[in-house]
Image (tube, rainbow, N blue to C red):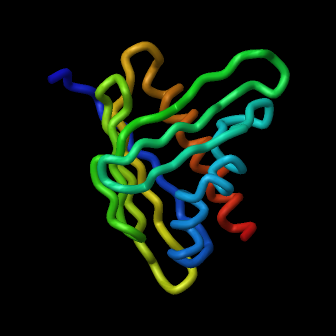
Amino acid sequence: MEKFEKITISTVIDATLETVWQAFTLPEHITKWNFASDDWHCPSAINNLVSGGAFSYRMASKKEDIGFDFGGTYLKVEPLNHISYELGDGRVVSIDFKSLDASSVLVEETFDAEKLNPLELQRNGWQAILNNFKSHAESL
Protein backbone atom coordinates (compact mmCIF):
# COMPACT_ATOMS: atom_id res chain seq x y z
CA MET A 1 0.00 0.00 0.00
CA GLU A 2 1.38 3.37 -1.03
CA LYS A 3 2.17 5.84 1.76
CA PHE A 4 0.92 9.39 1.40
CA GLU A 5 1.91 12.46 3.34
CA LYS A 6 -1.00 13.75 5.43
CA ILE A 7 -2.25 17.35 5.49
CA THR A 8 -4.65 18.68 8.14
CA ILE A 9 -6.82 21.78 7.79
CA SER A 10 -9.50 23.13 10.10
CA THR A 11 -11.96 25.90 10.84
CA VAL A 12 -14.37 26.89 13.60
CA ILE A 13 -17.91 27.52 12.40
CA ASP A 14 -20.40 29.68 14.28
CA ALA A 15 -23.44 27.43 13.90
CA THR A 16 -25.02 24.44 15.61
CA LEU A 17 -23.62 20.97 15.03
CA GLU A 18 -26.82 19.93 13.24
CA THR A 19 -26.59 22.91 10.85
CA VAL A 20 -22.93 22.23 10.13
CA TRP A 21 -23.58 18.53 9.48
CA GLN A 22 -26.48 19.22 7.09
CA ALA A 23 -24.55 21.92 5.24
CA PHE A 24 -21.61 19.53 4.81
CA THR A 25 -23.58 16.47 3.72
CA LEU A 26 -26.74 17.46 1.81
CA PRO A 27 -26.29 17.87 -1.97
CA GLU A 28 -28.36 21.07 -2.10
CA HIS A 29 -25.82 22.66 0.25
CA ILE A 30 -22.67 21.02 -1.19
CA THR A 31 -23.26 22.73 -4.54
CA LYS A 32 -23.19 26.13 -2.79
CA TRP A 33 -19.69 25.81 -1.25
CA ASN A 34 -17.65 23.05 -2.91
CA PHE A 35 -15.12 25.08 -4.94
CA ALA A 36 -11.86 26.82 -4.13
CA SER A 37 -12.35 30.14 -5.93
CA ASP A 38 -15.16 32.35 -7.26
CA ASP A 39 -14.40 31.49 -10.89
CA TRP A 40 -15.36 27.85 -10.21
CA HIS A 41 -18.62 26.28 -9.08
CA CYS A 42 -20.12 22.92 -8.17
CA PRO A 43 -23.03 22.35 -10.59
CA SER A 44 -24.00 18.94 -9.17
CA ALA A 45 -23.52 16.74 -6.14
CA ILE A 46 -24.60 13.16 -5.51
CA ASN A 47 -24.12 11.86 -1.99
CA ASN A 48 -25.01 8.43 -0.57
CA LEU A 49 -23.83 9.11 2.99
CA VAL A 50 -23.51 5.58 4.39
CA SER A 51 -20.52 3.31 4.94
CA GLY A 52 -19.86 1.76 1.53
CA GLY A 53 -21.89 4.50 -0.22
CA ALA A 54 -20.46 6.64 -2.99
CA PHE A 55 -20.37 10.37 -3.66
CA SER A 56 -19.57 12.45 -6.73
CA TYR A 57 -19.28 16.23 -6.90
CA ARG A 58 -18.81 18.02 -10.21
CA MET A 59 -16.39 20.95 -10.03
CA ALA A 60 -16.23 23.21 -13.08
CA SER A 61 -14.88 26.52 -14.27
CA LYS A 62 -17.51 29.21 -14.76
CA LYS A 63 -15.62 30.71 -17.73
CA GLU A 64 -13.85 27.84 -19.48
CA ASP A 65 -15.17 24.49 -20.60
CA ILE A 66 -13.14 22.55 -18.04
CA GLY A 67 -14.05 20.62 -14.94
CA PHE A 68 -13.69 17.35 -13.09
CA ASP A 69 -15.59 14.95 -10.89
CA PHE A 70 -14.44 14.59 -7.30
CA GLY A 71 -15.70 11.37 -5.81
CA GLY A 72 -15.08 8.37 -3.66
CA THR A 73 -16.50 5.73 -1.36
CA TYR A 74 -17.38 6.23 2.30
CA LEU A 75 -15.39 4.08 4.70
CA LYS A 76 -17.08 5.24 7.90
CA VAL A 77 -19.98 7.57 8.68
CA GLU A 78 -20.82 8.53 12.27
CA PRO A 79 -23.62 11.14 12.05
CA LEU A 80 -22.78 14.50 13.63
CA ASN A 81 -19.27 13.25 14.44
CA HIS A 82 -17.04 11.72 11.75
CA ILE A 83 -16.78 10.93 8.04
CA SER A 84 -13.98 9.09 6.28
CA TYR A 85 -13.77 8.18 2.63
CA GLU A 86 -11.40 6.80 0.03
CA LEU A 87 -10.78 8.51 -3.28
CA GLY A 88 -10.36 6.55 -6.51
CA ASP A 89 -6.56 6.75 -6.31
CA GLY A 90 -6.46 5.16 -2.84
CA ARG A 91 -6.01 8.35 -0.84
CA VAL A 92 -8.05 8.66 2.36
CA VAL A 93 -9.83 11.71 3.80
CA SER A 94 -11.04 11.96 7.39
CA ILE A 95 -13.33 14.71 8.71
CA ASP A 96 -14.17 15.26 12.37
CA PHE A 97 -16.94 17.51 13.68
CA LYS A 98 -16.47 18.62 17.30
CA SER A 99 -19.04 20.75 19.07
CA LEU A 100 -17.20 23.41 21.07
CA ASP A 101 -20.38 24.80 22.61
CA ALA A 102 -24.05 25.17 21.66
CA SER A 103 -23.26 27.39 18.66
CA SER A 104 -19.76 26.63 17.41
CA VAL A 105 -18.20 23.59 15.77
CA LEU A 106 -14.61 22.69 14.96
CA VAL A 107 -14.33 20.96 11.60
CA GLU A 108 -10.99 19.25 11.02
CA GLU A 109 -10.06 17.50 7.78
CA THR A 110 -7.02 15.29 7.33
CA PHE A 111 -6.26 14.09 3.83
CA ASP A 112 -3.59 12.14 2.03
CA ALA A 113 -1.68 14.48 -0.24
CA GLU A 114 -1.39 13.56 -3.90
CA LYS A 115 2.05 13.45 -5.50
CA LEU A 116 1.62 15.85 -8.46
CA ASN A 117 1.18 19.22 -6.76
CA PRO A 118 3.17 20.94 -4.00
CA LEU A 119 1.87 20.34 -0.47
CA GLU A 120 1.26 24.04 0.16
CA LEU A 121 -0.87 24.33 -3.00
CA GLN A 122 -2.97 21.37 -1.89
CA ARG A 123 -3.31 22.70 1.67
CA ASN A 124 -4.34 26.14 0.39
CA GLY A 125 -6.87 24.71 -2.09
CA TRP A 126 -8.55 22.44 0.45
CA GLN A 127 -8.54 25.24 3.04
CA ALA A 128 -10.18 27.61 0.53
CA ILE A 129 -12.98 25.08 0.03
CA LEU A 130 -13.35 24.66 3.80
CA ASN A 131 -13.48 28.46 4.16
CA ASN A 132 -16.30 28.56 1.56
CA PHE A 133 -18.06 25.89 3.59
CA LYS A 134 -17.70 27.96 6.76
CA SER A 135 -19.22 31.01 5.04
CA HIS A 136 -22.11 28.97 3.70
CA ALA A 137 -22.85 27.18 6.99
CA GLU A 138 -22.75 30.44 8.94
CA SER A 139 -25.24 32.01 6.50
CA LEU A 140 -27.92 29.40 7.24
**Quarter holding residue 81:** bottom left
Most foreground residue, 65 or 5:
65
In which quadrant will I find the C terminus? Answer: bottom right
On screen, residue 12 above or below 63: below
Q: Residue at x 57, y 49 (%)?
A: 130
How many numbered dots are placed on residues in this image?
0
Q: Residue at x 67, y 40 (%)?
A: 44
Most foreground residue, 101 or 69:
69
On screen, residue 97 above or below 49: below
Q: Is residue 123 left or right of residue 110?
A: right
**Quarter holding residue 36:** top right
On screen, residue 120 above or below 66: below
Most foreground residue, 13 or 35:
35
Q: Residue at x 52, y 32 (%)?
A: 70
In which quadrant will I find the N terminus? Answer: top left
Instruction: Give x and y (percent) for residue 26.
Output: 58, 58
Instruction: Give x and y (percent) for residue 43.
Output: 72, 38
Outermost left residue: 1
Instruction: Give x and y (percent) for residue 101.
Output: 48, 83
On screen, residue 23 above or below 74: below
Q: Residue at x 63, y 51 (%)?
A: 30
Q: Is residue 67 left or right of residue 90?
A: right
Instruction: Give x and y (percent) for residue 54.
Output: 42, 42
Outermost right residue: 63
